[in-house]
């Protein structure tokens, strides 16, 4: 079952570039290398000349260009030759694309691909330079009936600034005493670190709220560019955002898909990471990366000045003291969700059992001896299944309550099919895999995922059939596009199966359906909308979370929160809505994508604020594109 179709501007039909005139191998005897070389040479010539009038000879009329910071300091997805031309007109000469070079070897060298039936293209990864930096991209070329090759999909991503090299690799710090400014008389490494962590000699340029995977990654990347960064977190220790979760939690994503910036997980790291092990790794990472983190600290007040482009922030520390600071940027790295969504029901106060939200679940044993107790778990997403499995394994009689369909994909089969050939053992370099993974416009990914979701369903047919047999509603998502569209449009609605599905199939965990939800509680039961009663000693509300804006409002107040857009779903162009917005940055990423997206934040922050235009330049970048004046939510801002 797919989610009933509701018209969306991001529902697209992919064209057919195969049947007209036969397959590529029949229509064109040229090698993929020669096809790419000829097109890339013409493309570079057009870009360097700034003649957008020549683009129709190189880009298909219904082509796409997804750009991340190479053309300007935004994320763009443009569909159609006219929209692409409008984006580039007046900008090409300022951007200064040059030295476009296709990969010559490896997985992303020129090759012919058939992503779905009747759609063939030649694709390659390429590197490029602009006036301000270097980057990589992908191009997918299709052959028209007249034998002319044109780009149907182009992707460009700026990765590094010429004037702000990362302090890594060939540019790594010296480390010796003779490299210390002022010599050891002004302090050795340890003494200087102690002052640096307390910001006794300078103000932080960037204030990051949250020391989880996104905050740590971004902090490491920004500091590698020489920026002063402070991370504040309410917890006692780095990693407590994982330590404090339920006892049996293990990551649902494999290790190859979850590496951190500069410091990958060791080769002997487990495929799926227990929460406490991951928490300890974050603590090690923070120390190794020399991150400045204030624990047991929260934002007391925060004000932004449109006139100065600066923040005035008061931070309350663990000892009760308050520090005032004036950072140029504030980044919220508080997770991909907001505050727990905790419903209340008539009669709940009269219920003699225990009721709590899934976010409060630590372990079934925290409820005492649960053997034989009746537990109802409301919700069938990841948390609902994990909590139900935990209670079952501790001897409880568990019933899951499902209101609407859920997409189910197994961690042992389908999850690996999602990124097969990319994030595998022995796969391509992670940086290149990230480029490839981001290179298709998101609406195109949705369309292609329909076929991939069908392949996964076929591979997991036995389990899915077993779930259907017991009445479990399986929802393959909008248009049958699977997990990715559910994630980016609503942040949930799926279960990555780590064992609970089989317990349901075997009847070890019971299932009840209630499409119209819950009516209320009696003294001993949960009452469903149709009047049925489920006797319960414990009710766990695995009902999800509100938008991350609720966390922002709680921490920063209404004045700031009211200036921020809602997060999730796609904007009109097809980029994830409000990942960054005036006057804050958002880093709302899961472990699986905090590295590749964090790659783009440092260049944006070094040059100036992204989207809003209210952040000042941090470093002078010769040749940076002139953005002129644009209107942000705060008014007319001159970049």
Image: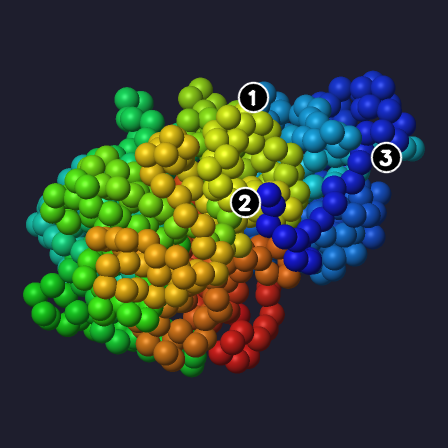
Would you say the residues marked 1 and 3 are in contact, meaning their CB atoms lie under 8 Å apart?
no
Number of other residues with Cα within 10 Å of mark 1, as a class: few under 14, some 14 to 19, many 20 or more: few
- Tell me which label, 2 or 3, sits earlier in the chain: 3
Q: Secondary structure at mark 2?
A: loop
Camera-side mark, 1 or 2 = 2
- Mark nearer the N terminus (1 vs 2): 1
Q: Earlier in the sequence, mark 1 or mark 3?
A: 1
Name the residue carrying label 2: 475
Q: Does residue 388 appear to the left or right of 111 in the view shown?
A: left
Residue 337 pos. (x, y %):
38, 57
Secondary structure beneath label 1: loop
From where the camera sits, is residue 58 visible?
yes
Please name which of the two marks, 2 or 3, marks the residue nearer to the observer.
2
Tell me if residue 345 comes above or below residue 479 in the rendering. Answer: below
- Which residue position is annotated with label 3? 144
Query: In the image as oriented, which residue stretches furthest toward the right?
Result: 146
| Residue shown at the point (33%, 27%) measured from the top left | 271
Q: Which residue is mark 1?
A: 106
Q: Is residue 27 left or right of residue 104?
A: right
Which sits in the foreground, 20 or 304? Answer: 20
Label 1 to label 2, Cα distance in Å?
37 Å
Q: Residues within 10 Å of mark 3 (few under 14, many from 20)?
A: some
Instruction: Kindly tell me whether residue 179 is visible in this rendering.
Output: no
């Amino acid at each position: 079952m797919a989610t009933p179709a509701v018209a969306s501007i991001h529902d697209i039909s992919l064209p057919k570039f195969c049947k007209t005139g036969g397959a590529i191998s029949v229509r064109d005897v040229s090698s993929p290398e020669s096809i790419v070389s000829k097109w890339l040479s013409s493309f570079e010539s057009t870009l360097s000349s700034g003649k957008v009038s020549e683009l129709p000879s190189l880009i298909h009329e219904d082509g796409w260009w997804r750009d991340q910071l190479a053309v300007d300091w935004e994320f763009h997805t443009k569909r159609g030759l006219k929209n692409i031309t409008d984006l580039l007109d007046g900008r090409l000469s300022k951007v200064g694309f040059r030295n476009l070079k296709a990969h010559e070897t490896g997985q992303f060298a020129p090759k012919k691909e058939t992503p779905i039936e009747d759609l063939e293209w030649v694709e390659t990864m390429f590197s490029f330079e602009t006036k301000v930096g270097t980057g990589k991209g992908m191009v997918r070329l299709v052959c028209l009936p007249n034998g002319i090759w044109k780009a149907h999909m182009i992707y460009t991503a700026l990765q590094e600034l010429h004037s702000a090299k990362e302090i890594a690799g060939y540019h790594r710090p010296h480390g010796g005493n003779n490299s210390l400014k002022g010599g050891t008389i002004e302090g050795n490494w340890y003494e200087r670190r102690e002052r640096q962590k307390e910001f006794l000699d300078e103000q932080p340029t960037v204030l990051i709220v949250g020391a989880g995977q996104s905050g740590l990654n971004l902090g490491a990347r920004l500091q590698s560019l020489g920026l002063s960064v402070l991370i504040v977190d309410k917890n006692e220790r780095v990693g407590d955002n994982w330590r404090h979760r339920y006892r049996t939690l293990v990551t649902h994503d494999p290790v190859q898909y979850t590496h951190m910036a500069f410091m990958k997980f060791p080769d002997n790291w487990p495929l799926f990471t227990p929460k406490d092990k991951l928490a300890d790794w974050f603590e090690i990472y923070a120390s190794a990366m020399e991150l400045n983190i204030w624990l047991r600290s929260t934002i007391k007040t925060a004000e932004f000045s449109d006139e100065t482009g600066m923040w005035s922030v008061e931070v309350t520390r663990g000892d009760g003291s308050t520090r005032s600071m004036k950072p140029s940027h504030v980044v919220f790295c508080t997770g991909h969700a907001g505050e727990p969504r905790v419903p209340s029901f008539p009669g709940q106060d009269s219920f003699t059992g225990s009721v709590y939200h899934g976010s409060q679940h630590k372990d079934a044993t925290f409820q005492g001896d649960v053997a034989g107790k009746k537990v109802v778990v409301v919700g069938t997403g990841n948390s609902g299944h994990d909590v139900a499995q935990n209670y079952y394994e501790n001897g409880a009689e568990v019933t899951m309550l499902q209101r609407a369909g859920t997409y189910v994909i197994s961690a042992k089969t389908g999850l690996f099919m999602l990124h097969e050939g990319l994030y595998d053992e022995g796969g391509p370099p992670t940086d290149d895999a990230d480029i490839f993974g981001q290179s298709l416009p998101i609406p195109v990914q949705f369309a292609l995922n329909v076929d991939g979701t069908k392949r996964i369903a076929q591979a997991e047919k036995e389990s899915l059939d077993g779930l259907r047999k017991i009445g479990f509603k399986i929802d393959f998502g909008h248009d049958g596009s699977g997990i990715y569209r559910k994630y980016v449009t609503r942040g949930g609605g799926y279960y990555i199966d780590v064992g609970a599905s089989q317990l349901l199939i075997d009847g070890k965990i019971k299932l009840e359906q209630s499409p119209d939800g819950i009516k209320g509680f009696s003294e001993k039961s949960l009452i469903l909308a149709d009047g049925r009663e489920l006797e319960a000693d414990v009710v766990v509300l695995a009902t999800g979370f509100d938008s991350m804006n609720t966390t922002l409002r709680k921490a920063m107040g209404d004045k700031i929160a009211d200036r921020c857009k809602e997060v999730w779903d796609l904007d009109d162009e097809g980029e994830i809505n409000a990942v960054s917005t005036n006057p804050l940055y958002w880093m709302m990423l899961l472990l699986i994508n905090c590295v590749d997206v964090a790659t783009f934040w440092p260049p944006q922050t070094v040059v100036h604020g992204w989207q809003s235009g209210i952040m000042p330049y941090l470093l002078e970048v010769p040749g940076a594109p002139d953005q002129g004046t644009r209107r942000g939510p705060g008014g007319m801002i001159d970049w």
